[in-house]
Image (cartoon, rainbow, N blue to C red):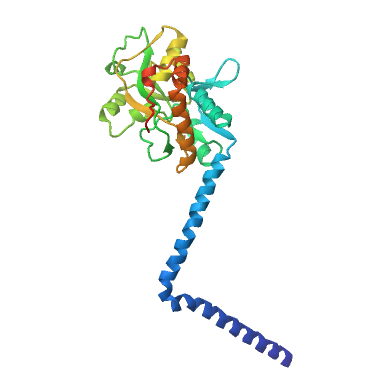
């Protein structure tokens, strides 16, 4: 019993000593209140280390060996699979040329357009480059400069007798999910477009435009709201059975979307794209895919 009491006494003494040490450590900041300037100076001294860390990050960007582009694989002429099974398109060919300039391996990564943000934030892709509209998304990504001026238009069967947007009243209209055309038709700040959408018999959303065109051809829908570049490609590939209405639904610009804050990669890709523009490569690729030269809005000045 005495041994137990002695042991308990020793433990109590040890605890008291430890408590005393802890109390001294806890009171130290209060006693050094006059050292605020010294603490600030120490923080300032650490600032170069932060700058060095950021510089190291920039150096790591210089060590890049691959460049993975996320794109909708059913969005011609910007990105799609050709008859040989290869992923091609205006945007993808430009991305390949950028990779050649920087010695990177080009990786074309088809994605579900609804999941594009998750793919980018997870690091599965380095950018979204596929007819990607900047308007309305300005603060959501780190953007390249715009490279294509684009409009949203309506495509209708040539023999449908539809000549204007007003003629779409009572019609079943198709549109791609999460597209600029859908955004234009549901923009609460654009009453004209809201009224237009309200006049439709129905607005049907599709996962991709190829399926939408199949339904347009079959008569399941009577009009299709779509990007002008995609519309031009689809009409050219399907003959004279379709026309675009002259009145655009909306206008916009395409850019390359990078993860917010990834300025180093954005700058590298953008500078390479400007070089390709100056060399005439962009115009040649545009001609190859039937994109009107007037739609290209790149320049030599940032």
Screen quadrant of the C terminus: top left
Above or below: residue 51 compared with residue 213 = below
Residue 54 visible? The answer is yes
Residue at the image point whose x is 31% and y is 12% from the top:
162
Q: Position of residue 115 (x, y in %)?
A: 50, 35
Query: Quadrant of residue 64 in the image?
Result: top right
Q: How many marks?
A: 0
Q: Nearer the viewer, residue 144 or 38?
A: 38
**Residue drawn at 27 percent across, 18 percent down:** 166
Instruction: Residue at 40% x, 27% y: name it.
Output: 147
Coordinates of residue 96 in the picture (x, y in percent): 54, 26
- Residue farthest along the bottom direction in this orientation: 2
Say left or right for 279 vs 253: right
* Residue 5 pos. (x, y %): 69, 90
Q: Position of residue 271 (x, y in %)?
A: 45, 32
Rendered position, 136 above or below 81 = below
Foreground residue among 16 and 225: 16
User: Which quadrant is the N terminus positioned in?
Assistant: bottom right
- Can residue 225 be seen? no
- The image shows residue 270, relative to residue 152, as above or below, that is below
Rendered residue at 52%/52% (across/down): 53
* Relative depth, front residue between 266 and 256: 266
């Amino acid at each position: 019993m005495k041994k137990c009491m002695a042991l308990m006494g020793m433990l109590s003494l040890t605890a008291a000593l430890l408590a005393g040490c802890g109390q001294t450590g806890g009171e130290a900041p209060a006693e050094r209140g006059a050292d605020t300037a010294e603490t600030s100076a120490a923080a300032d001294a650490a600032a170069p280390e932060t700058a060095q860390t950021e510089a190291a990050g920039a150096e790591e960007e210089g060590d890049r060996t691959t460049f993975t582009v996320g794109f909708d694989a059913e969005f011609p002429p910007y990105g799609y699979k050709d008859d040989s099974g290869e992923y091609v398109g205006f945007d993808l060919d430009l991305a390949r040329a950028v990779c050649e300039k920087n010695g990177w391996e080009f990786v074309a990564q088809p994605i579900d357009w609804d999941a594009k943000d998750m793919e980018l934030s997870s690091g599965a892709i380095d950018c979204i480059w596929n007819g990607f509209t900047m308007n309305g998304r300005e603060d959501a990504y780190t953007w390249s400069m715009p490279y294509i001026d684009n409009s949203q238009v309506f495509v209708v069967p040539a023999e449908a007798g539809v000549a204007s947007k007003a003629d779409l009243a009572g019609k079943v209209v198709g549109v791609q999910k999460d597209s600029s055309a859908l955004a234009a038709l549901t923009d609460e700040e654009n009453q004209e477009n809201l009224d237009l959408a309200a006049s439709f018999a129905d607005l049907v959303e599709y996962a991709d435009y190829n399926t939408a065109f199949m339904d347009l051809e079959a008569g399941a829908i009577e009009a299709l709201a779509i990007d002008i570049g995609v519309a031009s490609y689809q009409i050219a590939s399907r003959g004279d059975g379709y026309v675009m209405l002259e009145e655009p639904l909306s206008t916009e610009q395409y850019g390359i979307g990078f993860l917010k804050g990834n300025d180093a990669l954005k700058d590298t890709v953008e500078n390479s794209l400007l070089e390709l523009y100056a060399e005439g490569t962009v115009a040649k690729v545009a001609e190859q895919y039937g994109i009107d030269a007037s739609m290209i809005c790149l320049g030599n000045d940032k």
